[in-house]
Amino acid sequence: MGGTIGIIGGNGALGGAIAEGLLASGIVAEGDLWVSSRSGTGPRFSGAEALRVTGDSRALVAACETVILSVPPATAGEISIRAEGHTVISVMAGITLERLKDIAGTERVIRAMSSPAAARRLAYSPYCPGFGATAEDRAEAARVLGAVGLTDAVPDEDQLDRFTAITGPVPGFVAACAAAMKAHAVKAGIAPGVADRAVRQLFHAAGVIMAEGASPEEAVQEMIDYAGTTAAGLTVLKDGPFEAAMDAALEAAYRRAKMIGRG
Ligand SMILES: NC(=O)c1ccc[n+]([C@@H]2O[C@H](COP(=O)([O-])OP(=O)(O)OC[C@H]3O[C@@H](n4cnc5c(N)ncnc54)[C@H](OP(=O)(O)O)[C@@H]3O)[C@@H](O)[C@H]2O)c1
């Protein structure tokens, strides 16, 4: 069990999900997890009564060793805290390490990306430490972000903009694949409700299996090598515009992520 953690914007979609996941993980004791917002409201989930809720982000900083920033990029400049002596982790899209130092009033900043899957401890939360972050700050980022899913240190901020596109939205682009498969089933005459159940179950099973089994490329190659019905379809995908379309879609989302926080 670690020390106190505070989430500024902890009443929001992502901040609340991180709070829920952190409580479920057990790395923070009841009463040691704070959330703040301008309205002084907390997130709503079963067990949220264990949180300390405040409308004063400076009081949160005073009480917490580790501070997570999770407010919309447009209001990040209004946070106005002085967090010297604290580990500061931001999960805000597009807010650079350079800006974070000004917003948080400390050099000890770490920029990360996460997703609301944190509530189920299923987020992917890569992070990039600023030059002023200590070894302890880096270890704390790995501990806190690892408690709500998987995490990796990445070498530069640009990769966080990539992950803002790839893993920030959940189910994101995976939902687009599922919707295309469902549309095919409905076009073939399968009842929409049945198609919906079938595709959801497929993606549920695929997610569980891919989390632990063969890599995505190995899984595709195994099915091609098996040379059955799936291979017939995968060959069409490989020779067609699918990979180029996904590449273009993620590139567009990445370019949009690069623009956040600039305006
Ligand atoms: N949601 C996602 O799927 C997702 C995924 C990846 C990254 N993110 C990032 O996570 C951050 C939060 O996104 P979100 O979707 O959780 O937003 P959200 O649902 O709007 O929640 C943000 C909360 O922050 C509070 N807030 C706003 N300005 C504040 C300030 N100056 N000081 C204290 N609290 C403030 C707001 O409550 P009050 O109005 O009461 O202050 C609001 O409830 C964003 O930077 C976003 O880029 C989100």
Image (tube, grey):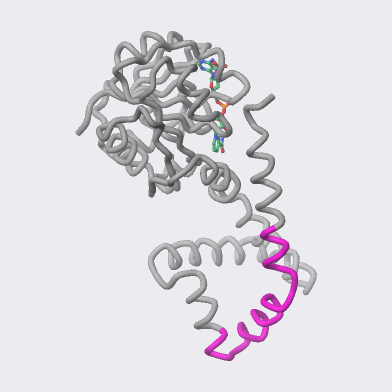
Residue 96 x, y percent position in the rendering: 53, 30
In percent of width and height, residue 2 lies at 22, 31
Q: Is residue 115 visible?
A: yes
Along the line of sight, the residue nearer the viewer: 208 or 146: 146
Residue at image location 70% in from the left, 54% down from the top: 249
Quarter of the image holding residue 3?
top left
Q: Residue at x 71, y 48 (%)?
A: 252
Vertical arrangement, residue 87 with respect to residue 38, above or below: below
Q: Main secondary structure of the magenta part?
A: helix
- On the image, the x and y values in percent for residue 66 come to 32, 25
User: Magenta stretch: residue 217 in it?
Assistant: no
Q: Which residues are magenta?
A: 224-247
In the picture, which quadrant includes the N terminus? top left
State which image quarter holds ligand 1. top right
Q: Is residue 99 left or right of residue 132?
A: right
Spot occupied by residue 162 in the image (x, y as percentages of width and height): 57, 47
**Residue at 50% in and 14% down:** 79
User: Residue lying furthest left in this view?
Assistant: 1
The residue lying at 63 percent from left, 54 percent from top is 173
- Furthest-bottom residue in view? 227
Seen in the image, is 203 located left or right of residue 53?
right
Q: Is residue 177 above or below residue 111?
A: below
Quadrant of image for the C terminus: top right
Residue 189 occupies quadrant:
bottom right
